Image: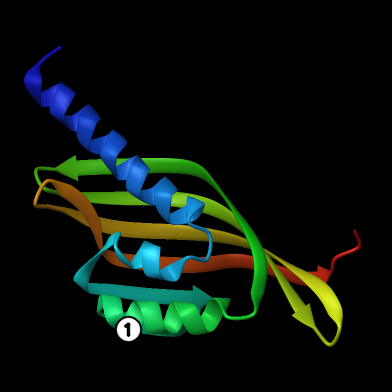
Amino acid sequence: MSENVLEMLEAKEAIREVIDRFSNLECDVAAQKALFTDDTHVTVYMGGQKTMDICGADELEKQFSAFTTGVKDSHHMNGQQVIEVEGDAATDVHYCKALLITEQDGKTMISDNYIRYTDKLIKKDGKWLISEREQHFVCSESRELNA
């Protein structure tokens, strides 16, 4: 196997690790922040409308923390993923199903979210970090949880 192919495979695996780690951290926003560059730019769309336009990792932590404040439990499952690497830059497109459990008016609610992410990553000091994220909530449904 050529050195370039091996480097490409290693880069893709490291990027997968960043994406999966973000999901595995669930709502631990402070830990998730470490996966982004300091000057990151994140846009979030819900129903085709831009709902967040975040500049910088500190602002990301502030806004994501506010968004997840009422979340009692969550579960994220990543699906299809395509990664393109060009040197120390990469683009990752992946899909995620995110379930969020909240309490509303004395009822336990579940929010079922289907999300498409387009991330731009850079390799900085040997680590892959998300420098830009476009997050589309393609479909979201909220209902009472009947456990």
Query: Do we see residue 99 in this rendering?
Result: no
Mark 1 secondary-structure assignment: helix
Q: Give the amino acid type for the residue marked by disc 1 in the picture.
A: Glu
Residue 138: which quarter of the image? bottom right
For label 1, the residue is 59
The single residue placed furthest to the right in the displayed view is: 146
Nearer to me, 58 or 15:
58
Identity of the residue drawn at 43% across and 46% down: 20
Q: How many marks?
A: 1
Identity of the residue drawn at 18% across and 49% down: 127
Query: Do we see residue 53 in this rendering?
Result: yes
Nearer to me, 80 or 26:
26
- Horizontal and vertical percent position of residue 111: 71, 68
Nearer to me, 99 or 45:
99
Chosen colour scheme: rainbow
- Horizontal and vertical percent position of residue 86: 13, 43
- Horizontal and vertical percent position of residue 77: 57, 48
Identity of the residue drawn at 19% across and 72% down: 38
Identity of the residue drawn at 82% across and 73% down: 108
The residue carrying pointer 1 sits among few (fewer than 14), some (14 to 19) or many (20 or more) residues within 10 Å by Cα, namely some
Nearer to me, 69 or 51:
69
Residue 4: which quarter of the image? top left
User: Compared with residue 65, is residue 138 higher up or lower down, i.e. above or below?
Assistant: above
The single residue placed furthest to the bottom in the displayed view is: 105
133 lies left or right of 143: left
The single residue placed furthest to the top in the displayed view is: 1
- Horizontal and vertical percent position of residue 40: 24, 72
Image quarter where the N terminus lies is top left
110 lies left or right of 118: right
